[in-house]
Image (spheres, rainbow, N blue to C red):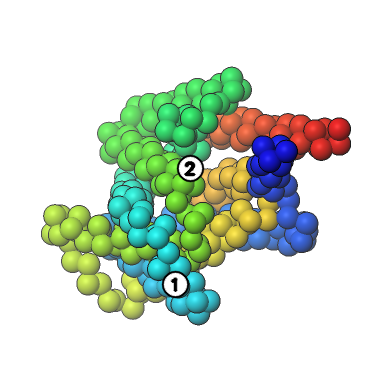
């Protein structure tokens, strides 16, 4: 009896992670999804508006992000959880995750100055592909054949896009593409770390710690390249604060809230909207019109990512169906 009840409780917890929160509605969820995609899409544009070095932008985005999230957490009284053993026992993992986030931002921010916004954003947003691969290796989450097909398609699109840049825009653009891909790998590692350790503490506490560590780790990188991080020009400060508020607090934080309301694959699908939004904004503001090869590679990568997300969604629906059948019988 005890074992049976334990199994039922485990299944219920699994279903609770998949089913939409009954307190939510489309009128609430859809505007929040649109908000998160729009805000995250603004990141690349804000980065290009700044005249500071990429690594300096990383420092101030993460530092201001930590300050904003700390303020919210303090107002809510969330920092009482710092006394819990789970935070103390995993501090070294939190440091590693913060360093990974810094490396993600550094590689991606630098790529934006070397290749087009469209190429950079779509390549860095291929992180779900690397997350799927790394989850298989480190978390034992086996992928189905459809997901592997999607991964192969997305990687083919990335190679096609990079080859087009090498043949047309030159080695600089190719270097930017490779940096963006590196940023995608670091982002995948960051997501895996978050899936493992963020659930045991309030999101305000987790992000404050991670952002602050990322900012601290970026300091020696700036020193290594002889960069001055003490930038207080009004225009630059406004951009740094905008980076912390819009793509960070109103983008990533809204996504974290949505994860408590809808299945994870719904939020993950937002990754398909960011490259499109960023490419449109870049075309309107910086007149960066993607060439035919970039557009083809762009679409192939998105198709591959969509296949992986669709496979995840079908697995979620299968779990729900199995649970309902078992519960009904």
Q: Residues within 10 Å of mark 1 (few under 14, many from 20)?
A: some
Which residue corresponds to mark 1?
A: 79
- Residue 242 x, y percent position in the rendering: 44, 69
Whether residue 155 sits left or right of residue 255 in the image: it is left
Q: Residue at coordinates 40% horizontally, 68% vertically from top-left?
A: 83
Name the disc covering residue 125, or none. 2
Element assignment for label 2: loop
- Residue 249 x, y percent position in the rendering: 50, 65
In-front residue for pair 35/281: 35
Above or below, 48 relative to 16:
below
Q: Residue at coordinates 20% horizontally, 55% vertically from top-left?
A: 221
Looking at the rendered image, the quarter that the C terminus falls into is: top right
Q: CA distance from mark 2 to mark 1?
A: 32 Å
Query: Quadrant location of residue 170?
Result: top left
| Residue 149 is at least partly visible in this image | yes
Element assignment for label 1: helix
């Amino acid at each position: 009896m005890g074992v049976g009840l334990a199994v039922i409780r485990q299944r219920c917890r699994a279903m609770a992670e998949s089913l939409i929160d009954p307190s939510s509605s489309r009128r609430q969820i859809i505007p929040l999804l649109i908000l998160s995609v729009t805000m995250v899409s603004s990141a690349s544009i804000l980065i290009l508006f700044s005249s500071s070095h990429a690594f300096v932008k990383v420092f101030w985005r993460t530092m201001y992000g930590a300050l904003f999230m700390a303020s919210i957490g303090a107002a809510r009284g969330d920092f009482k959880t710092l006394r819990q053993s789970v935070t103390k026992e995993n501090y070294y993992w939190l440091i590693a995750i913060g360093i990974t986030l810094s490396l993600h931002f550094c590689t991606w921010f630098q790529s934006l100055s070397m290749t087009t916004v469209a190429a950079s954003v779509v390549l860095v947003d291929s992180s779900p592909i690397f997350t799927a691969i790394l989850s298989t290796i480190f978390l034992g989450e086996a992928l189905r054949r459809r997901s592997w097909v999607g991964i192969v398609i997305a990687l083919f699109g990335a190679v096609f896009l990079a080859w087009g840049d090498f043949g047309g825009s030159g080695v600089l653009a190719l270097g930017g593409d490779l940096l963006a891909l590196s940023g995608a790998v670091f982002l995948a590692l960051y997501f895996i770390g978050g899936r493992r350790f963020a659930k045991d503490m309030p999101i305000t506490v987790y992000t404050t710690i991670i952002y602050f560590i990322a900012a601290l780790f970026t300091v020696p990188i700036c020193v290594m390249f002889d960069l001055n991080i003490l930038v207080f020009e009004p225009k630059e400060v406004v951009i740094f604060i905008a980076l912390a508020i819009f793509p960070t607090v109103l983008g990533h934080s809204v996504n974290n809230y949505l994860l408590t309301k809808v299945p994870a694959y719904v939020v993950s699908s937002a990754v398909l909207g960011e490259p499109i939004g960023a490419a449109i904004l870049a075309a309107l503001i910086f007149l960066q019109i993607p060439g035919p090869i970039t557009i083809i590679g762009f679409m192939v990568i998105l198709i591959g990512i969509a296949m992986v997300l669709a496979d995840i969604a079908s697995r979620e629906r299968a779990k729900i169906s199995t649970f309902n059948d078992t519960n009904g019988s």
